[in-house]
Amino acid sequence: MTAYNVVRFRVKPGRDKEFIDMHRQAKTDFKGWRNGALVKTGDQSYCFVGEWDGFDSIVAARPGMIGMLDSFRDMLEDLGNGLGVTDPVSGETVLQLKTKAAPKSAKPKAKKAKEKAKKAAAKAARKPAKKKKTAAKKKAAKRRRR
């Protein structure tokens, strides 16, 4: 089952760029690692969210993640309340939310109009063109009716 780890940080003044660069260069070749994101949540405040194949993958990767943290620990401020420089949490997914796709029959109006015009053009191409009567033929037809 999918699991996530979330870590909150506060970076020392003037160290934001360096902190972001360290994450950009970080090796994330942990077994079970899917992807992650570093989110700026305020002035000097960040949150890292990692997605994993399962909670066991997070547990197995903790020594490596702590090693990564040690590489930029000097850039972080203490969060207070006895937390230290990080506020980590992790756990298994209990609900996965996804965007609901529009029904297949619901097409944008512009696309429907384009399809309608295309069908009309195809239909017109199948019909033989009507011959236009010339002025002389119209006169001759008129004389015959008299």
Image: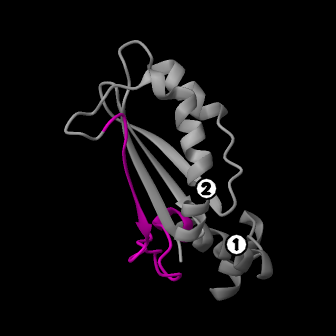
What secondary structure is the stretch in magenta mostly built from?
loop
Answer left or right for 78 relative to 73: left
Magenta-span inclusion, residue 86: yes
Q: What range is drawn magenta here?
A: 84-112
Of circles 2 and 1, which is in front?
A: 2
Farthest top residue in view: 14
Say which residue appears at 37% left-offset and 40% top-offset.
86
Amino acid identity at mark 1? Lys
Left or right of 99? Residue 45 is left
Q: Nearer the viewer, residue 44 or 63?
A: 63
Residue identified by numbered label 2:
61
Pointer 1: what residue? 138
Q: Return the mark for residue 130.
A: none
> In the drawing, does residue 59 fall left or right of residue 125?
left
- State the residue in front, 30 or 84: 84
Dot 1 crowding, Cα within 10 Å, few <14, some 14–19, many 20+:
few
Would you identify the image quadrant in which residue 77 lies?
A: top left
What residue sits 55% from the left and 62% below the top?
Answer: 59
- Asked if residue 93 is positioned above or below residue 77 in the image, the reply reads below
Query: Is residue 23 visible to the viewer in this orientation of the structure?
Result: yes
Could you tell me residue 101's position as x and y percent? Answer: 47, 74
Query: In the image, is residue 143 part of the stretch drawn in magenta?
Result: no
Looking at the image, which residue is at 50% across and 19% down? Answer: 17
Q: CA distance from mark 2 to mark 1?
A: 91 Å
Residue 52 placement, left or right of 137? left
User: Going by the picture, which residue comes out furthest to the bottom?
Assistant: 145
Q: Quadrant of the C terminus?
A: bottom right
First of labels 2, 1 by sequence position: 2
Q: Position of residue 122 (x, y in %)?
A: 74, 75
Q: Amino acid at mark 2?
A: Ala
Q: Position of residue 19 (x, y in %)?
A: 50, 25
